[in-house]
Image: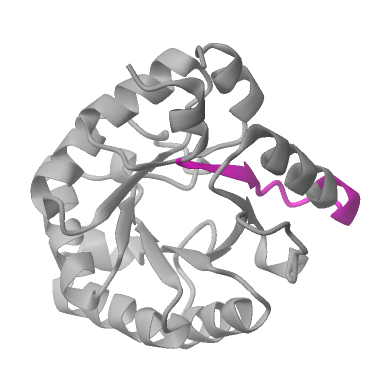
Amino acid sequence: MPSRRDIAAIIDHTLLTPEATGEQVAALVVQAAELGTFSVCVSPSQLPVEVPDGLRVATVCGFPSGAHATAVKVAEAADAVAKGADEVDMVVNLRQVKEHDWEDVEAEVRAVKAAVGAALLKVIIESAALTDEEVVAVCRACERGGADYVKTSTGFHPAGGASTHAVRLMRQTVGERLGVKASGGIRTAEAALAMVEAGATRLGVSSTVSILDGLED
């Protein structure tokens, strides 16, 4: 079973509430460093964020609806990287997904990936709002567009967050070629371990302390 340290090392320690203050983000960074998480994930308006060596900075793009124009997502992603983001979590255009416009999905992912350059691009597909067939198809489109990861959820959609079923399906679709990030509603050690067992290689959580407190070193 993965240890506390193993799980901490794949966590994006997240604070994306709209009312989050700069003081709260600074405290998030201190806590992330103490816990040994992979990164902190904050809203783009919080950038730049000063972090100690070894801690990465992630942010979001087109968040949380994904309904922004492609040009807006491209500009937001480029600005985030210019302000020090190492990773960008972009929300897919759900209208395009539900209309099965896979070429447009692919084109948008490709455009945002070009904007972030060497930074890591994760694409949030809102898996709880999709059929299994749509999950598979959107993951394939994201891969063709150059995404580095596919990610389950924003945590803000009324359909819900991550499920082990979705994570397993996403992993089966992308194989070992892409990372899979589970996020949304993961609040316990048991839930985190289940996501990893299903194929997640990154976890986006705000309940990091309670998750890690449930694991052994």
Q: Quadrant of residue 3?
A: top left
Residue 72 position in % (x across, y down):
53, 83
Residue 24 position in % (x across, y down):
84, 45
Asked whether residue 177 appears in the rendered view, the answer is yes
Q: Residue at x 25, y 25 (%)?
A: 197
Asked whether residue 20 appears in the rendered view, the answer is no
Q: Quadrant of residue 163?
A: top left
Q: Residue 104 or 206: which is nearer the viewer?
A: 206
Q: Residue at x 39, y 68 (%)?
A: 121
| Above or below, comparing residue 3 to residue 132 in the picture | above
| Above or below, comparing residue 34 to residue 142 in the picture | above
Q: Residue 57 or 104: which is nearer the viewer?
A: 57
Residue 31 position in % (x across, y down):
75, 37
In this image, 202 relative to 107: left or right?
right
Q: Residue at x 63, y 84 (%)?
A: 82
Residue 150 is inside the magenta segment: no
Color theme of the render: one colour
On-image quarter of the N terminus = top left
Q: Residue at x 15, y 39 (%)?
A: 169
**Residue extending furthest toward the right:** 23
Number of numbered labels in the structure image:
0
Residue 78 position in % (x across, y down):
54, 84
Q: Which residues are magenta?
A: 10-24
In this image, 217 relative to 213: left or right?
left
| Above or below, comparing residue 124 to residue 160 in the picture | below
In this image, 117 relative to 48: left or right?
left
Q: Residue 114 or 102: which is nearer the viewer?
A: 114
In this image, 163 relative to 64: left or right?
left
